[in-house]
Amino acid sequence: MDFLGQNDKSGRNFMDERIEALGAAVREARQRRELSQEQLASMMGTDQSAIARLEAGKINSGIGTYIRAADALGIPFKSLVNF
């Protein structure tokens, strides 16, 4: 990786990797609390498909979305960014 956001030798984008890591952290926290995607979506005021995309790292949500997810899960936001 030459610069933030540029592709590394594998063709992966640095930011894509971080978005996927954030999504995985949300999924792991949700599963630890034995919540369904539907339940988390309801707590966040969104729908299940948005949670599925968020957890899969398929959308680049703003930081506010991840903060809302952390709040809904009862965890500090910083616990999602441990990568």
Image (spheres, helix red, strand yellow):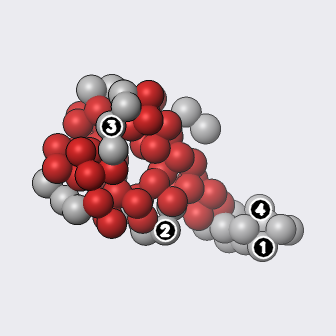
- The kind of residue tagged 3 is Leu
Between the C-alphas of marks 1 and 3, the distance is 34 Å
The structure residue drawn at horizontal position 46% and vertical position 54%, both measured from the top left corner, is 55
Give the label, 1 or 4, closer to the camera: 1
Which numbered circle lies on residue 35?
Answer: 3
The structure residue drawn at horizontal position 51% and vertical position 61%, both measured from the top left corner, is 57
Between the C-alphas of marks 2 and 4, the distance is 21 Å
- The kind of residue tagged 1 is Gly
Decide if residue 56 is on the left or right side of residue 39: right
Between the C-alphas of marks 3 and 2, the distance is 20 Å
Mark 2 closeness class: few <14, some 14–19, many ≥20 residues within 10 Å: some
Query: In which quadrant will I find the N terminus?
Result: bottom right
Disc 3 secondary structure class: loop
Mark 4 closeness class: few <14, some 14–19, many ≥20 residues within 10 Å: few
For label 2, the residue is 58
The structure residue drawn at horizontal position 26% and vertical position 52%, both measured from the top left corner, is 38
For label 4, the residue is 1
Near-viewer residue (19 or 28): 28
Which numbered circle lies on residue 36?
Answer: none
Looking at marks 1 and 4 on the same chain, the residue that comes earlier in the sequence is marked by: 4
Disc 4 secondary structure class: loop
- The kind of residue tagged 4 is Met
Give the label, 4 or 3, closer to the camera: 3
Between the C-alphas of marks 4 and 3, the distance is 36 Å
* Location of residue 19 with respect to 58 vertically, above or below: above
Mark 1 and 2 residues: CB-CB less than 8 Å, in contact?
Answer: no
Which numbered circle lies on residue 11?
Answer: 1
Between the C-alphas of marks 1 and 2, the distance is 17 Å
